[in-house]
Amino acid sequence: MDQTITGGCLCGKLAYQVPGPVTTIDYCHCSRCRKASGSAFAAVTSVSKSQFKITSGEQYLKSYKTDDDFERVFCSECGSQLYSIRPALVDTIRLRLGSIDTAIEGKVSAHIFATSKAQWHDICDEAPQYEQRRMVVA
Ligand SMILES: [Zn+2]
Ligand SMILES: [Zn+2]
């Protein structure tokens, strides 16, 4: 079975593909993900950086780097977040689950930065909660 993950941004200019399937689903409740997503948390999974391919619209890729070299990549046309890059992760990017078009079987695996969560949001599932990030075996 073809387990390629495909996805893209809201305006459709950017599209990507990467070998799947999605194995882990983290909800990141850190304040930066909340700001960047405009929501209670960012839903992310880890995929291979070297196998991740932009299939159209590469010229629309824009990234925002924080002073600790954490990079967030998004569409310069519609603002959709696609993935982030942590300097500590060599061949991994953190793909935003909401940008994926392929059907995903799993449910949330873990809540990270759970202690930073929005006060107005309650975590209502049994997935483990981590104070910060966890080591991702991708
Ligand atoms: Zn776009
Ligand atoms: Zn975060």
Image: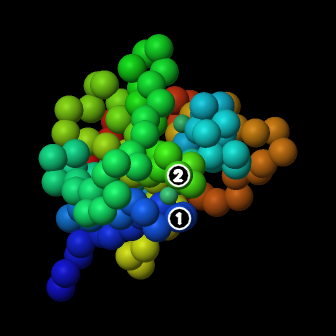
Q: Residue furthest bottom?
A: 1
* Res 25 quadrant in image: bottom left
Q: Residue at x 34, y 58 (%)?
A: 57
Q: Residue at x 50, y 46 (%)?
A: 76
Q: How is the image coloured?
A: rainbow
User: Which image quadrant shows ligand 2?
Assistant: top right
| Residue holding disc 1 | 11
| Quarter of the image that includes the N terminus | bottom left
- Disc 1 residue type (three-letter): Cys
- Disc 2 residue type (three-letter): Glu
> Residues at badges 1 and 2 in contact (C-beta under 8 Å)?
yes
In this rendering, is residue 27 above or below 117? below
* Res 7 quadrant in image: bottom left
Q: Residue at x 22, y 56 (%)?
A: 53
* Res 114 quadrant in image: top right
Mark 1: give few (<14), some (14-19) or many (20+) Cα within 10 Å: few
Coordinates of residue 46 in the picture (x, y in percent): 33, 49
At numbered mark 2, what does the secondary structure look like: helix, strand or loop? loop
Mark 2: give few (<14), some (14-19) or many (20+) Cα within 10 Å: some
| Residue holding disc 2 | 77
Of the residues under marks 1 and 2, which one precedes in the sequence?
1
**Mark 1: is the Cβ under 8 angstroms from ligand 1?**
yes
Kindly identify which numbered label has been placed on residue 43: none
Q: In the picture provided, is 64 more to the left or to the right than 48? A: right
Is residue 81 shown to the viewer in this render? no
**Of residues 71 and 115, which is closer to you in this image?**
71
Coordinates of residue 14 in the picture (x, y in percent): 39, 60
Q: Residue at x 22, y 45 (%)?
A: 49
Is residue 112 shown to the viewer in this render? yes
**Mark 2: is the Cβ under 8 angstroms from ligand 1?**
yes
Coordinates of residue 23 in the picture (x, y in percent): 32, 61
Q: In the picture provided, is 95 more to the left or to the right than 132? A: left
